[in-house]
Amino acid sequence: MRSLVIAGLTAIFATSGVHSESSDKLGIGRTATEAEIAGWNIDVDRNGTNLPPGKGTVGLGREVFDQQCAACHGAKGEGGVGDKLVGGQGTLATSKPVKTVGSYWPYATTLFDYIRRAMPHPSPQSLSNEEVYAVTAYVLHLNGLLPENASLDSKTLPSVRMPNRDNFVGDPRPDLK
């Protein structure tokens, strides 16, 4: 039966102009340009590699959060239809852990990365770099990790020490270094 299915698929691909060899192209699409790849290559790692230029303050973050985030995450990050962003410190080892930015996330840079790539719903990547730095600063402030007058940029953001940073275990596989 298996060989009959494979023979049938081979015949379909052969007559459709699509090659069955894995090294051949499927006859659709094209190779992305360097500019197209650069537009999506915006990830930021835990050390802050690839953080963009810009600067944001807690005050601006409050304004942007009120306009773009509060409808889902609550006025003070307490949650709603979106995840709770604030609180939960000291609950991870309990029977009812509360995983928030302030209790669970190990790196502030990955918060920036997530906001930049995925928020606000339903318009991801619509915030400027300054707005992303600002919202990141505001969420960290709500969690007691930054003072009211703080600002963040590519130099200061990686230095924010998250409370749960030391409770994650690195992946020892050599191919992931």
Image: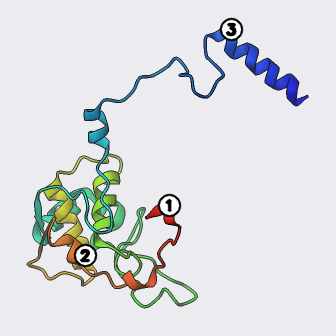
Callout 3: helix, strand or loop?
helix
Which of the two discs, 2 and 1, labels the residue nearer the N terminus? 2
Residue at the right extreme, as displayed: 1
x and y, in percent, of residue 83 in the image: 42, 67
Q: Amino acid at mark 1?
A: Asp
Which residue is rendered at x = 81% and y = 20% of the image? Answer: 7
Q: Quadrant of residue 57?
A: bottom left
Q: Amino acid at mark 2?
A: Leu
Which residue is rendered at x = 34% and y = 85% of the image? Answer: 163
Q: Amino acid at mark 3?
A: Thr
Q: Mark 2 or mark 1, which is nearer to you? A: 1
Q: Which residue does the numbered mark 3 point to in the structure image?
A: 15
State the separation of the CA atoms marked 3 and 1. Answer: 41 Å
x and y, in percent, of residue 110 in the image: 33, 65
| Residue 36 badge | none
Residue 109 vs residue 26: left or right?
Answer: left
Callout 2: helix, strand or loop?
helix
Q: Is residue 133 above or below residue 158?
A: above
Q: Which residue does the numbered mark 1 point to in the structure image?
A: 175
x and y, in percent, of residue 134 in the image: 16, 64
Q: Which residue does the numbered mark 2 point to in the structure image?
A: 140
State the separation of the CA atoms marked 2 and 1. Answer: 33 Å
